[in-house]
Structures are given as structure tokens and as C-alpha cells.
Image: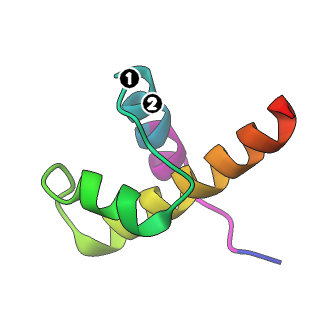
Amino acid sequence: MGKIKTNLIKRTAKNLLEKKIEFSENFEKNKEILKDTMPSKKIRNQIAGFLSRFKKKEEKINL
């Protein structure tokens, strides 16, 4: 089982998706997109990981 993400991570990720920023299923690309906007490395990596898993799940549902 994976770690449970905090509400801060989920809320921030959803706000970024609402801003129409194009994220992908690739963690490294998402990390590069977030590099300038996130204050800390740990939060940036958690959000990038959450977004990549979210995009993979979204793609699976759309098939």
C-alpha cells in the first residue's frame, strides 16, 4: 500500500489542474513543470507524483 497524501497536496494539485496547466503521466516532466512554482523540494515531488498517478488513472478511465 502507498502513503496517504495530505489534503494540502490534493488541493494544490487540483488547483493546478484547474489553471489548465498540461501535466503528463511522466513524473520527471511534472517535476520540471513545478520547479519554479513550488517552495520546497518535498512538496514539489509529492505533487508531481500525485499528478502523474492521477493522469494515469484518468487515462485508464477514458479508454
Which class describes the residues within 10 Å of circle 1: few (<14), some (14-19), or many (20+)?
few
Name which residue type carries label 2. Answer: Leu
Say which quarter of the image contains residue 17: top left
Quarter of the figure that contains the C terminus: top right
Task: Identify the image's colour scheme: rainbow, by chain, secondary structure or one colour.
Answer: rainbow
Question: In the depicted view, which residue is nearer to us: 4 or 13?
Answer: 13
- Give the quarter of the figure containing the N terminus: bottom right
Residue matched to label 1: 20
Relative to 23, residue 4 above or below: below
**Which image quarter: residue 40?**
bottom left
The spot of residue 2 in percent (x, y) is 74, 75
Looking at the rendered structure, which numbered label has been put on residue 39? none
Q: Name the residue under label 2.
A: 17
Provide the residue span drawn in magenta.
Answer: 3-11
Residue at the spot 44% in from the left edge and 59% down from the top edge: 48
Cα separation, mark 1 vs mark 2, equals: 5 Å
Q: Is mark 2 on a helix, strand or loop?
A: helix
